[in-house]
Image: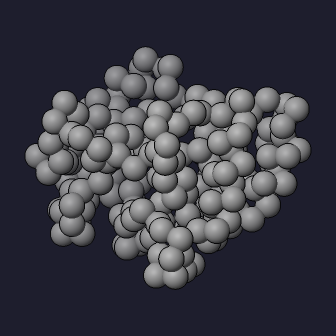
C-alpha cells in the first residue's frame, strides 16, 4: 500500500545517508536484517576495508558524535575503496551538515537528506518512505505523506535545504515518527557525489 501511495519514490534510486554504508560493522540491507545466513555472510565481506575504517575513525566505544561510516578525507575514502571486495557496489560521497544560508543551500548533485549526524546512518526520508524499518507511517497518513514528498528528486532526496526543512518540520509533528532525543538531532545533510561508481 505504501508503494502505491508513493508513486514517485523508487527505493532503488535512493541516494541518501541510509544506503547501508560501509562501516566497521557491516549493516544488513533492508529486507535482510533478520536473515541469519545473509548476516553471517556479511561478516566475511570487505574485512580489510572495515579494519582500515576502524583504524581511521576509532571503535564504536570510542566514538562521540562521529559518523562511523564517514572517514576524515577523500584520500582516506579512496584508500578504503582499494580494500573493498567489490568496488562497484560502493560510491564515495561527501556529506556535510547543511545550514540555511546561501553557501550551503544551493542545489547538490544528489540532494538533501535528513537524519542523525553521527552514530549511524538513520534517515527520516528512508524510514518513512523508502525502506520503513523503525517508524514507518500507517495507512491514514499515506496521502499526506505523498503530498509532503512531491518535491523529492530522482535520488529520493530533497533538491534544496528549504524543501528538506519543510519536511523535517512536518515529520516532527507526527505521532508515528521517530522522536528526537534532543532538539535539533535531525540534521539536514547535503549529499554530493565525489567519485563515480
Q: Position of residue 56 (x, y in %)?
A: 14, 51
User: In the figure, is residue 163 to the left or right of 194?
Assistant: right
Q: Residue at x 21, y 61 (%)?
A: 72
Q: Residue at x 15, y 42 (%)?
A: 58
Task: Name the image quarter holding the N terminus.
Answer: top right
Q: Residue at x 39, y 25 (%)?
A: 39
Task: Name the image quarter holding the C terminus.
Answer: bottom left
Splitting the image into 4 quarters, where does residue 13 fall? bottom right
141 and 74: which is toward the camera: 141
Q: How is the image coloured?
A: one colour
Q: Position of residue 55 (x, y in %)?
A: 11, 46
> Is residue 34 visible in this depiction of the protein?
yes
User: In the figure, is residue 78 to the left or right of 152?
Assistant: left
Direction left: furthest residue: 55
User: In the figure, is residue 148 to the left or right of 40?
Assistant: right
Q: Residue at x 78, y 54 (%)?
A: 148
Splitting the image into 4 quarters, where does residue 27 fall? top left
Q: Is residue 12 above or below residue 182?
A: below
Q: Position of residue 67 (x, y in %)?
A: 31, 47
Q: Is residue 146 above or below residue 102?
A: above
Q: Is residue 102 above or below residue 44?
A: below
Amino acid at each position: 500500500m505504501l508503494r502505491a501511495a508513493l508513486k514517485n519514490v523508487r527505493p532503488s534510486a535512493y541516494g541518501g545517508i541510509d544506503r547501508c554504508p560501509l562501516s566497521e560493522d557491516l549493516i544488513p540491507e533492508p529486507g535482510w536484517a533478520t536473515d541469519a545466513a545473509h548476516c553471517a555472510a556479511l561478516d566475511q565481506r570487505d574485512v580489510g576495508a572495515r579494519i582500515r575504517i576502524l583504524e581511521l575513525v576509532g571503535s564504536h566505544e570510542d566514538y562521540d558524535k562521529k559518523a562511523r561510516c564517514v572517514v576524515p578525507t577523500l584520500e582516506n575514502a579512496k584508500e578504503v575503496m582499494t580494500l573493498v571486495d567489490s568496488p562497484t557496489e560502493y560510491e564515495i560521497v561527501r556529506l556535510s551538515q547543511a545550514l540555511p544560508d546561501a553557501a550551503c543551500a544551493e542545489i547538490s548533485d544528489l540532494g538533501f537528506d535528513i537524519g542523525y549526524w553521527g552514530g549511524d546512518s538513520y534517515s527520516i526520508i528512508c524510514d518513512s518512505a523508502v525502506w520503513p524499518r523503525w517508524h514507518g507511517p500507517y495507512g491514514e497518513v499515506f496521502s499526506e505523506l505523498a503530498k509532503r514528498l512531491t518535491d523529492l528528486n530522482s535520488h529520493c532526496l530533497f533538491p534544496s535545504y528549504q524543501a528538506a526543512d519543510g519536511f523535517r518540520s512536518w515529520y516532527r509533528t507526527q505521532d508515528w515518527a521517530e522522536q528526537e532525543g534532543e532538539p535539533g538531532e535531525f540534521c539536514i545533510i547535503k549529499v554530493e557525489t565525489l567519485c563515480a561508481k
